[in-house]
């Protein structure tokens, strides 16, 4: 049985200025879960796009089930027996599960056939689905189930899963693993793309580790530990960060009191009675699976939404709930929203111009409404130097920077104002490990110098690494805070999944 | 499956040089297409293009006429740039122009037998206020009721034209005008002074250049200009920055309306000298083409206004010397806009044919 089911043979794919896949060779055994591990930008996505027919390799080949693969589109890939579940769902939100299934498959299928096949698949692989439910009403885990079922209806021999657990609760992850194991027991093969080390060890049989477009190692997961995999993935030992509570003062920086806000909109999560307090010098983390009210809460904390139903936001004894973002900046509060492109930065504008998006009283970027371009330029250069932003210069457009570099620039812009309070959402979302490390370090350093920080993040590891206290947001409600030092991960996982026991 | 159809893909880096060259390419392609059209109509294309684009400006009088036509176009276009930079699609400049002519012209009619240095400035102010107020209506509807400004500003054009119609046949009709639908002449000091004797080019040109310079300063040197730009590119970033977007909508519409209003007033107090039905050959609509042909940039708008003004003059000459309808001028304007938009797409996207 253990023949080479998929074999990558010297696959190379080059993009302008970067070699995404450099001479990639490894093989995947039949009926196994094979992990493709690597940090962001390691070349995993490119490789999988080549396998799925979305990109053509510059050189090299892939053999699938003994034959050289010659496909030029995903539909051909599916016809050959390769299916893929993407990280970002491609479902029609307003249609029902059934409509999405019928629309999503290549062959014509009658409703009755579909129903029968579905019952089959549902019971066999632990994938219950309500056919008449509209997609909007489903949780992330259920949406993923729809995606998986849609692929399984076409009976693929190889299933590619791209970061499938990034939006799931720990309980949903368990269910997914049961499904994946059932698929493998039946003889199917799974290529599992991830950057989560624990998943590789618990779920996968073999692992291929990529770094900067090259295969670093391809081996069995036996005898591997999270630590050994991390070393291979990152290539250098990152120093361990330790939580230090000694500098936190016993004075309040920001208190949120009983904030409620309803939206009357299925795409928004109503916030219910949210209260928390942040002390001077403290990093306060808000964990939770996406879509549980984080962005709604962020809008209220930033001042982009000042229309709350009830509650108070008090900063240094001043009620700020009705203040717009600029008025809050005048009080030395800085913000970094989740999206870089088009929210915390304008891609079409230069870095210098992007500096102007958040003006703090001491910046003096303008006088009587007239800009001082020299001042702005110098400040942009200072941010670029201090935070090691890789860019040709302050006149480069924001869109030309990689995600990590732009995020360093945005965070640098906010930190350089030496704020009393920094509110930051998903600080390291979608960026490489090097930038991630630099950002986390600078946040910790900032807090040690007396800045209070609120971090909203889906990344539990990140929150545990940098925060002093954590609470969990679920369906618009915020849990009580826990000291990060002695927090129980299982407890957080349950809270994130809405179970409060 | 759909391998027969080409797909359109975003270019990873669109050429900065091409962005500047696009208007020139568009004009060039328009000339080629124009000569093909002329050939089909049975004219020697070189003769036709010469009649259309060269002979109108081969005399100092012709140059003066070119400037007379370019003046309102450039002034309205620079005003529109305030809106378009902010992604506000005000296409009702024609109405704002008309309202400016009514307000400013109304003052001129009221003081028809009075002379004084104060009269023209007062009329200009009236024109600016009239245009700005008319521009504020779609702004108000947009900010209060979230209406689409494209529709409301366009519909208000016709309202303004009907109001003008009513005034010139009704209460403001010239008592000595033999019932013609026109008002009295403005007094001498209610007219735009001519810059050169014997030529029609007037003070409006200087006012326009001044306002274009001020606009350039606002766009490139002030917080307000920056706010317009950010709000146009990304409303979310503008919200994050704490810019008041409703204020920006009012200001953009107000400034654009005021500029169009001044353009309207400078038409009626310049070449025309009174109010009647057809004070503008669609300057307010044509200025939209000027704004885009000029890439929303003050210098670009100056050049674009000259090119488009030439299509007006050329059409008149073509009617005179080639006996073809003056509407051919609109054909050229349409062609320029068509090629401009088409070339823009090809600069920013590429067409990919799948194997």
Image (spheres, coloured by chain):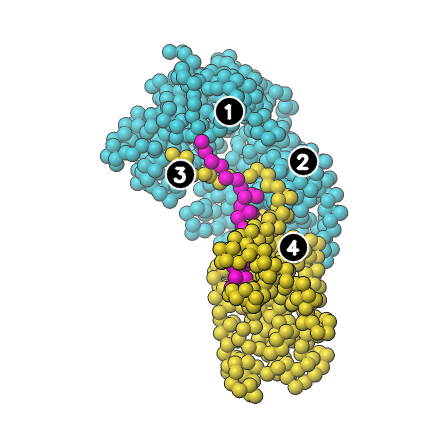
Chain colours: A cyan, B yellow
Chain under disc 3: A
Report the Cα–Cα distance between label 2 and label 1: 29 Å
Q: Quadrant of residue A412?
A: top right
Closest to the camera, between mark 2 and mark 1, is 1
Q: How many numbered callouts? A: 4
Q: Is residue A394 left or right of residue B91?
A: right
Tell me where residue A389 appears, x and y as whole percent: 67, 35
Dot 4 falls on a residue whose secondary structure is helix
User: Which residue position holds label 4?
Assistant: B300
Q: Is residue B330 magenta?
A: yes
- Same subunit, labels 4 and 3: the answer reads no
Labels 1 and 4 in the same subunit: no
**2 or 3: tag closer to the N-terminus:** 3
Q: Which residue is mark 1?
A: A57
CB contact under 8 Å: marks 4 and 3: no
The label shown at residue A91 is 3
Q: Residues within 10 Å of mark 2 (few under 14, many from 20)?
A: some
Real-space Cα distance between discs 3 and 1?
A: 28 Å
Q: Residue at x 67, y 78 (%)?
A: B190
């Amino acid at each position: 049985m253990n023949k080479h089911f998929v074999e990558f043979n010297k696959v190379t794919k080059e993009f302008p200025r970067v070699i995404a896949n450099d001479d990639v060779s490894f093989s995947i055994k039949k009926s196994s879960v094979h992990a493709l591990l690597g940090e962001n930008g390691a070349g995993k996505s490119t490789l999988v796009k080549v396998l799925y027919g979305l990109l053509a390799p510059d050189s090299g080949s892939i053999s699938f089930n003994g034959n050289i693969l010659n496909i030029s589109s995903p539909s051909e890939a599916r016809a050959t027996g390769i299916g893929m579940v993407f990280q970002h769902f491609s479902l029609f939100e307003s249609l029902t599960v059934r409509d999405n299934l019928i629309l999503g498959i290549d062959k014509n299928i009658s409703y009755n056939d579909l129903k029968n096949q579905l019952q089959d698949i549902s019971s066999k692989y632990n994938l219950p689905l309500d056919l008449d439910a509209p997609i909007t009403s489903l949780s992330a885990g259920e949406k993923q189930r729809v995606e998986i079922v849609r692929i399984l209806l076409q009976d693929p021999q190889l299933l590619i899963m791209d970061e499938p657990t990034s939006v799931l609760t720990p309980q949903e992850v368990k269910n997914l693993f049961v499904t994946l194991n059932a698929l493998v027991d039946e003889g199917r093969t799974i290529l599992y793309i991830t950057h989560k080390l624990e998943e590789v060890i618990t779920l996968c049989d073999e692992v291929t580790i990529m770094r900067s477009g090259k295969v670093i190692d391809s081996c069995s997961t036996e005898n591997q530990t999270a630590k050994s995999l991390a070393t291979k993935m990152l290539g250098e030992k990152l120093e361990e960060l330790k939580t230090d509570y000694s500098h936190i003062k016993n004075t309040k920086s920001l208190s949120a009191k009983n904030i409620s806000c309803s939206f009357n909109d299925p795409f928004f999560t109503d916030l219910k009675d949210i209260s928390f307090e942040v002390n001077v010098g403290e990093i306060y983390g808000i964990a939770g699976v996406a879509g549980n009210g984080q962005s709604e809460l962020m809008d209220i904390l930033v001042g982009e939404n000042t229309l709350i139903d009830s509650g108070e936001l008090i900063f240094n004894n001043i009620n700020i709930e009705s203040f717009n973002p600029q008025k809050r900046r005048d009080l030395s509060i800085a913000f970094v929203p989740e999206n870089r492109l088009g929210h915390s930065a304008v891609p079409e504008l230069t870095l210098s111009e992007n500096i102007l998006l958040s003006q703090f009283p001491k910046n003096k970027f303008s006088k009587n409404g007239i800009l001082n371009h020299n001042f702005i330029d110098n400040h942009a250069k200072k941010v670029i130097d201090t935070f090691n932003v890789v860019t040709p210069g302050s006149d480069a457009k924001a869109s030309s920077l990689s995600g990590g570099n732009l995020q360093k620039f945005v965070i640098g812009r906010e930190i350089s104002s030496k704020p009393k309070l920094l509110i930051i959402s998903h600080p390291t979302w979608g960026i490489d490990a090097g930038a991630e490390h630099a950002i986390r370090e600078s946040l910790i350093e900032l807090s040690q110098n007396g800045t209070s920080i609120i971090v909203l993040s889906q990344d539990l590891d990140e929150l545990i690494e940098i925060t002093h206290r954590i609470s969990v947001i679920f369906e618009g409600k915020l849990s009580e805070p826990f000291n990060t030092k002695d927090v129980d991960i299982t407890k957080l996982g349950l809270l994130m999944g809405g179970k409060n026991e | 499956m759909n391998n027969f159809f080409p797909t359109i893909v975003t270019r990873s880096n669109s050429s900065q040089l091409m962005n500047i060259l696009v208007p020139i390419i568009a004009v060039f392609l328009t000339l080629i297409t124009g000569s093909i059209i002329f050939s089909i109509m049975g004219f020697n294309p070189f003769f036709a293009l010469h009649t259309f684009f060269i002979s109108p400006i081969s005399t100092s009088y012709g140059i003066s006429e070119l400037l007379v036509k370019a003046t309102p176009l450039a002034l309205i276009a620079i005003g529109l740039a305030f809106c378009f930079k902010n992604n506000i699609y005000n296409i009702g400049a024609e109405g704002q122009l008309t309202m400016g002519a009514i307000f400013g012209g109304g003052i001129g009619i009221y003081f028809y037998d009075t002379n004084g240095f104060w009269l023209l400035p007062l009329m200009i102010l009236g024109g600016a206020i009239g245009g700005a107020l008319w521009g504020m209506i779609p702004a108000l509807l947009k900010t209060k009721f979230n209406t689409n400004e494209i529709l409301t500003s366009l519909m208000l054009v016709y309202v303004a034209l009907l109001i003008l119609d009513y005034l010139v046949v009704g209460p403001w009709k010239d008592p000595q005008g033999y019932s013609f639908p026109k008002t009295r002449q403005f007094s001498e000091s209610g007219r735009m002074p001519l810059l050169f004797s014997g030529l029609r080019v007037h003070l409006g040109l200087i006012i326009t250049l001044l306002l274009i310079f001020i606009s350039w300063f606002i766009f490139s040197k002030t917080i307000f200009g920056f706010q317009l730009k950010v709000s146009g590119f990304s409303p979310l970033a503008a919200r994050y920055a704490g810019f008041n977007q409703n204020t920006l909508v009012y200001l953009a519409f107000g400034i654009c309306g005021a500029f169009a209003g001044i353009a309207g007033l400078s038409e009626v107090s310049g070449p025309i000298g009174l109010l009647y039905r057809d004070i503008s050959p669609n300057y307010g609509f044509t200025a939209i083409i000027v704004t885009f042909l000029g890439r929303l940039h003050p210098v670009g708008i100056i050049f674009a206004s000259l090119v488009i003004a030439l299509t007006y003059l050329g059409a008149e000459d073509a009617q005179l010397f080639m006996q073809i309808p003056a509407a051919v001028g609109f054909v050229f304007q349409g062609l320029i806009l068509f090629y401009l938009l088409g070339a823009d797409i090809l600069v920013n996207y590429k067409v990919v044919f799948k194997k």
